[in-house]
Amino acid sequence: MRPYLVLATLAAALALAGCGKKQDAAPQGGGGDRPIPVTLQAVRPQPFVDTLQALGTVRARESVTVTASVSEKVQAVHFDSGDSVRAGAPLVTLVGDAQQAQLREAQAAAGEAESLYRRQSELAGQQLIARSQLETQRATRDAANARVAQVRAQLAERVIRAPFAGVLGIRQVSPGSLVTPGTVVTTLDDISTVFVDFPVPETQLALIAAGQRLAGTAAAYPGRRFEGMVDTVDARIDTATRALTVRGRFPNAERLLKPGMLLQVEIARAERPALLVPEIAVVQVGTESYVYRVRDGKAERADVKLGARAGGQVEIASGIAAGDVIVVDGTGKLRPGAKVVDAAKSQGGDNNSATAG
């Protein structure tokens, strides 16, 4: 009989222990049903101006590498690195003694041919020489004048001039150095106005047009904004990148923007109404995005499609509608179906109760 008594005693003890656990668990179950305080916000359409951003490269309005076109020694250099020059200003003079001598010879021959032509013209008028002889002398005179023009052109090649007004780069030659065709003398850039070329995806092509306003920022000038406009939209789309090049024009009177500089370009679109929510309200898991919408005091998952972002807010293109209430702060502790309460109202109620007590 003793074994049976022992077994009965153990069964009674286990039953009492089980009752105790149920009683202990009961308060925890009631606490889990308590609403979770979160920050709520009603979604309303708001005026929104989003921007298209791209990284562009600054280019001079006019740019050229100044080179020599003949083989000769440098006689004089008329500029310093970084000078601003007008169009046609002499930059380098090459030695041209031989051409000067040839010019004097050609001018003398041309003068003699002109005098002889005039005398023969008078004689031809008096019918003292044949007309054909006068025509021959005219051809001789014209050839002599052409020779003068040829030598002058050769002399002009001995003076390298600025093809347009702009800013010179670093000087690459010195007096006495020998230059040959293609030898770099310096660079010349017209940067009073600059172009900025930047890529735009083909999906945004309909939003770009010549004349649109641009804004640009450069890392070299923090806090400085450069204003410009769309000058040209390229006629071709790159098949590899599926983007096309847009050229913006920026005034550059202070010459702060240099060719080759990177510029962050923004194109402002027309103002439109949009459903905007704080970015912290959007939960992103992989490629999926959703928010917690509150209905009847419970949170439910609403998958959304996102649009543009600006100033810490993101546009909701689809998934929720105007008037919906969503959870802004506190999404990390929510699950679909969880009860929620507005933290602001909850704190206000606690404070009132404390004050009343």
Image (cartoon, rainbow, N blue to C red):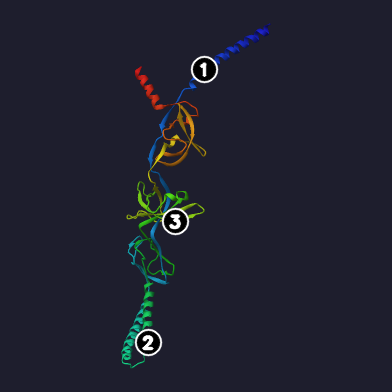
Q: Is residue 80 above or below residue 56?
A: below
Instruction: Tell me the distance, in whole angstroms, between the alpha carbons under discs 1 and 2.
Output: 129 Å
Tally of marks: 3
Which tag, 3 or 1, sits closer to the chain's start?
Answer: 1
Q: x, y (%) of residue 69?
A: 42, 70
Q: Residue furthest right?
A: 1
Q: Where the C terminus falls, by quadrant?
A: top left
- What is the number of the mark on residue 135? 2
Amino acid on which disc 3 is placed: Asp
- What is the number of the mark on residue 234? 3
User: In terms of image quadrants, where is residue 348?
Assistant: top left
Observer-nearest residue: 251 or 287? 287
Nearest to the eye among marks 1 and 2: give it: 2
Which tag, 1 or 2, sits closer to the chain's start?
Answer: 1
- Residue 72 visible, this orientation: yes
Q: x, y (%) of residue 230?
A: 39, 53
Observer-nearest residue: 175 or 16? 16
User: In terms of image quadrants, where is residue 247?
Assistant: bottom left
CB atoms at circles 1 and 2 under 8 Å apart?
A: no
Q: Is residue 342 above or below residue 147?
A: above
